[in-house]
Image (cartoon, rainbow, N blue to C red):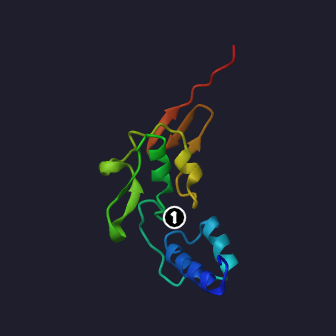
Amino acid sequence: MTDSPLIRKHRAMNLQLLLPYAPEAPALREIADSLGVMSPVFVPVAGAPLPDCILCELCVRVCSAFGHNALSTIGRGDHERVGPPFGETAAMACVGCGSCHEICPTGCITLEDTGTTRSIWGRTFSRRLTTAG
């Protein structure tokens, strides 16, 4: 059974553990509403290096699956975070594909696209437009 009262109770508790990291994330708010969780039980996490990150590591896994390994988890316990490895301020191995941005369930990975550039993880990439000839 995947939707019993006991399962819903456990889902609500897991959500309570995630909400302090991203209390306003639309995806979490939607789940919270469906489970009847009106307000977080735990105090919000303040000063996180990547606000709204719930440490699901989907961005790290998709980056690795594409062979770039531009992201990693850094630290342990309440100091754990996601970002460029080895204390780098920019993800030097990032190719600007945006897969991490697309897979992030809370939308905490910012990606800025203009007509000619893309900025993500502290790097700006030139976007070359090609025309069919």
Viewer-nearest residue: 13 or 98: 13
Using the image, determine if residue 127 lies above or below residue 94: above
Using the image, determine if residue 65 lies above or below residue 47: above
The residue at which mark 1 appears reads as 52
Using the image, determine if residue 75 lies above or below residue 123: below
Viewer-nearest residue: 114 or 128: 128
Q: Residue at x 30, y 49 (%)?
A: 86
Helix, strand, or loop for circle 1?
A: loop
Question: Can you name the residue that lies furthest to the left here?
Answer: 86
Q: Going by the image, does 38 lie left or right of 20?
A: right
Label 1 is placed on what type of residue?
A: Asp
Picture quadrant of residue 34: bottom right
- Residue 38 image point, x, y percent: 64, 83
Q: Quadrant of the N terminus?
A: bottom right
Q: How many marks?
A: 1
Q: Going by the image, does 17 lie left or right of 90?
A: right
Q: Residue at x 69, y 17 (%)?
A: 132
Q: Residue at x 45, y 59 (%)?
A: 50
Using the image, determine if residue 127 lies above or below residue 111: above
- Residue 63 image point, x, y percent: 47, 46
- Residue 102 image point, x, y percent: 59, 50
- Residue 126 image point, x, y percent: 52, 30
Q: Quadrant of the C terminus?
A: top right
